[in-house]
Amino acid sequence: MDIALKILAVIVGAALVVAAIGSAIKTVVLPRASVSFITRWVFLGLRGIFQMIAGPSLAQEKRDRRLAWYSPLGLVLTLAAWLTLVLAGFTLIFWGAEDLTPLEAFDLSGSSLFTLGTTRPATTPGFALTFVEAAIGLFLLALLITYLPSIYSAFSRRELGVTALEVRAGSPPSGAVLVWRFWALRRMEHLNAVWIEWERWFVDVEETHTSLPAVVFFRSPQSDHHWVTAAGAVLDGAALAASTIDIEHDVQADFCLRAGYLCLRRICDFFGIPYDPTPDPTDPISITRAEWDEAVAGLEEEGVPIKADREQAWRDFAGWRVNYDSTLLALANLTSAPSAPWSSDRSGDGTVRPRLFRGAVMPPSERGGDDPTTFSA
């Protein structure tokens, strides 16, 4: 019976060690959208705590300061979870393979993992196991350290666009303000460069925010800036330019819109947030006709040329917005984005919660495909 129990302990211990290493490789090394249960469990557990200590009732700046700790603390706790699993796993392995009490096995495992050298095994296989455990501990620590530059590089590139957008779209950013400012400065022809720049921005964010998911929750240095509200402002500006503003049609605005809503959808896929992958252009959106009319009237008062057929313009705008409306609001909710017009100002109470048992990004067959009919309004 004792032999069977010790064999079982070795098997369970080895499984814990393999789980920790597999989680680390999925989280840090694998260059694609993949998530481990351990990493997700740590971040979801921590999210529940932050929802209590940084609730919507707090002032924006105070809430933002608290939420800024969420993702960095999650990374540290993820490393702690990996090390804890390795410590527990090798404790079971040492207890099952060596003639040790549970306390002595724990002491030997801790001494090996943290390279303290305070306890030495009595057998050659035991020495080999201590070397393996020490190497795994250093490996996990080195992985996280090398992971951080990639995260902050992606964060820096993202925030460069978010900060620059304040000059063009105000703070908090607005698609209508973006269009108005270019008109007021007589630079409407330069909107093309904005759509090109943000198409690339969306492509980069899609790649980095699914392969490095912790960066999704990294907050901007300024409390009124946020990557989700910036994305919403650019998409709304492009949708207005493509549907409502009486200027020569720029296909680059269409490409920017497509890149944007695909980016938001892929991130929602990663976090298991549902959405309609093939919305109908006539499906309801969160922007009311009255809100759109008010924005259009404001632009018209400033001299911005508006298309004569308002009904068709509204249908075209809604046809574009329906592609990203629900995903934009869901991500604003998920990340507790600060209030901004037509995005986080209507995103709810911050209760969007990714599924615990969610794996990698859903394949197109499960999402319902990518219907090319939703490319245009």
Image (tube, rainbow, N blue to C red):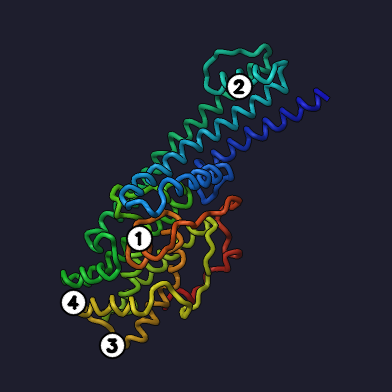
Q: Residues within 10 Å of mark 1 (few under 14, many from 20)?
A: many
The amino acid pointed to by label 1 is Thr
**Left-right relation of 257 to 36:** left
Q: Which residue is mark 1?
A: 229
**Left-right relation of 110 to 171:** right
Q: Which residue is mark 3?
A: 308
Secondary structure of residue under mark 4: loop
Can you give x and y, in whole percent of width and height, for residue 47 in the image? Answer: 48, 47
Can you give x and y, in whole percent of width and height, for residue 13 in the image? Answer: 67, 30
Q: Judge whether 252 appears above or below 27 on screen.
A: below
**Left-right relation of 272 to 224:** right
> Distance of mark 1 from mark 3, alpha carbons?
30 Å
Residue at 35% across, 60% down: 229
Mark 1 or mark 2: whose residue is earlier in sequence: 2
The picture quadrant where one finds residue 36 is top right
The picture quadrant where one finds residue 118 is top right
> Distance of mark 2 from mark 3, alpha carbons?
75 Å
Q: Which mark is residue 302?
A: 4
Can you give x and y, in whole percent of width and height, for residue 48 in the image? Answer: 50, 47
Q: Which residue is mark 2?
A: 109
